[in-house]
Image (spheres, rainbow, N blue to C red):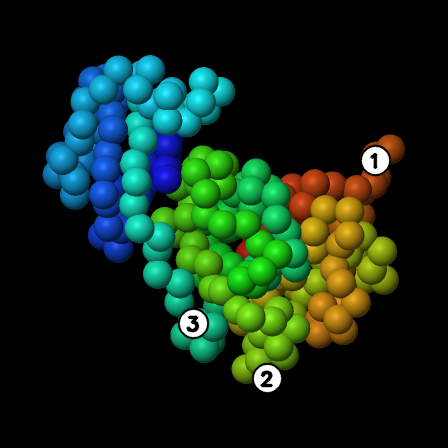
């Protein structure tokens, strides 16, 4: 279930999506036809209230709602040798995940590694927060995160764990590929086993009164540092 301008328009432009239904207000359809002259599904023109009844009055749908099959998840061993990956250690809040997916798309992240359990589904809320990012950054679903990190390490990936108490500052880590940035859940952070599977743990040095950052903000800062020219 997708709603909102960016999630729906980006999904409609993705040849890998299979759609079952598209609802659009008249104004939204005019705007959509300006950027996508050919749509993969016949739209149903509705009034905004019809979409409100499906999503609730608080959802910011901008006149677009779609139902589609989930995107196919690639395998971990299909990741290229120059990949930049993110790995989620039990991050479940769909707003945080969506914000991270959006940032990942902006910084050219190859894929996001997450587990089948203790992870959010690609819901409409997550897709809205990702603002179209789900169409550009695939989710690689693994059974066990530690085993996946070990496998990536054997392939030469540098495994970088983000930890506010780490002994190494982010400033001391140079951009490199292949690499995987490992992010922990809000409050709990990285689990001990996950920490043991990282090559280096890094912290973001904050100078203000508040030293901790939301995980999506921390991901953005770290990705900027890891993708800037060496």
Vertical position of residue 164 compared to residue 207: above or below: below
Q: Earlier in the sequence, mark 3 or mark 2?
A: 3
Q: Is residue 80 visible?
A: no
Marks 1/2: CA distance?
A: 37 Å
155 on left or right of 9: right
Q: Earlier in the sequence, mark 1 or mark 2?
A: 2
The image shows residue 147 at horizontal and vertical percentages of 62, 77
Q: Quadrant of residue 62?
A: top left
Disc 2 is placed on an element classified as helix
Q: Which quadrant of the rendered structure holds the N terminus?
A: top left
Furthest toward the front, the residue is: 53
Marks 3/2: CA distance?
A: 16 Å
Which residue does the numbered mark 3 point to in the structure image? 75
89 on left or right of 109: right
Which residue does the numbered mark 1 point to in the structure image? 210
Q: Mark on residue 154?
A: 2
Q: Earlier in the sequence, mark 3 or mark 1?
A: 3
The image shows residue 205 at horizontal and vertical percentages of 80, 48
- Near-viewer residue (6 or 117): 117
Marks 3/1: CA distance?
A: 39 Å
The image shows residue 58 at horizontal and vertical percentages of 49, 20
Q: Is residue 50 visible?
A: yes
Q: Residue at x 53, y 62 (%)?
A: 116
């Amino acid at each position: 279930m997708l709603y909102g301008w960016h999630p729906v328009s980006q999904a409609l432009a993705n040849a890998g999506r299979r759609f079952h239904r598209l609802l659009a207000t008249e104004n939204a359809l005019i705007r959509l036809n300006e950027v996508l002259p050919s749509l993969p599904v016949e739209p149903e023109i509705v009034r905004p209230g019809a979409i409100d009844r499906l999503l609730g009055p608080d959802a910011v749908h901008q006149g677009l709602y779609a139902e589609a099959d989930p995107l196919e998840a690639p395998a971990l061993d299909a990741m290229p040798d120059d990949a930049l990956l993110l790995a989620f250690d039990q991050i479940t809040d769909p707003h945080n995940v969506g914000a991270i997916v959006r940032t990942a798309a902006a910084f050219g992240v190859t894929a996001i590694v997450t587990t089948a359990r203790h992870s959010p589904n690609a819901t409409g809320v997550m897709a809205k927060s990702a603002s179209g990012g789900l169409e550009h950054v695939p989710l690689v679903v693994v059974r066990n995160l530690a085993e996946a990190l070990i496998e990536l390490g054997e392939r030469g990936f540098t495994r970088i764990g983000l930890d506010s108490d780490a002994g190494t500052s982010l400033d001391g880590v140079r951009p490199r590929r292949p690499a995987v940035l490992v992010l922990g859940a809000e409050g709990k952070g990285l689990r001990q086993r996950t920490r043991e599977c990282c090559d280096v743990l890094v912290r973001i040095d904050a100078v203000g009164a508040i030293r901790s950052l939301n995980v999506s903000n921390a991901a953005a800062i770290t990705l900027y540092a890891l993708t800037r020219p060496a």
